[in-house]
Amino acid sequence: MKKKIHPNYGPCAVTCACGNRIATKSTVEKITVDLCSKCHPFFTGKQKIVDSAGRVEKFKRRYAARKITKKAVKSKE
């Protein structure tokens, strides 16, 4: 391997938005994440909506104006 071309690989602190801290190794010293295994819905079994920049509200406003209509399906009898 060539020397002095690889990044330094050392200890890293991963911090979640819920406050959980995880010690690992990486090429960067600090990593901030939105979800971790302590607060992710898959692991907790509870539904949690993570809203990044109002995307959920934007989706609800866009589709709230639409009316859902069901087409009458004629049976082939």
Image (tube, rainbow, N blue to C red):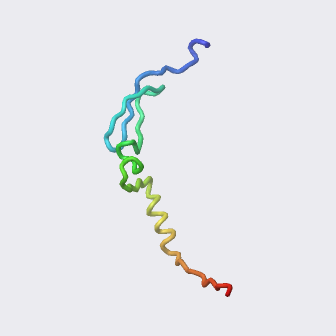
How many labels were placed on the picture?
Answer: 0
Left or right of 69: which side holds 61? left
* Front residue (pair 3, 77): 77
Q: Against 50, is 64 above or below?
A: below
Q: Residue 44 location, x and y as percent?
A: 36, 49
Q: Against 8, is 75 above or below?
A: below
Give the quadrant of the C terminus: bottom right
Left or right of 59: which side holds 36? left
Residue at 53% over, 75% down? 66
Q: Against 44, is 23 above or below?
A: above
Q: Against 36, is 2 above or below?
A: above
The residue furthest bottom is: 77
The residue furthest right is: 76
Q: Residue 2 location, x and y as percent?
A: 61, 13
* Front residue (pair 45, 64): 45
Q: Residue 7 location, x and y as percent?
A: 52, 21
Left or right of 70: which side holds 25? left
* Front residue (pair 7, 20): 20
Give the quadrant of the N terminus: top right
Q: Residue 26 location, x and y as percent?
A: 46, 27
* Front residue (pair 37, 9): 37
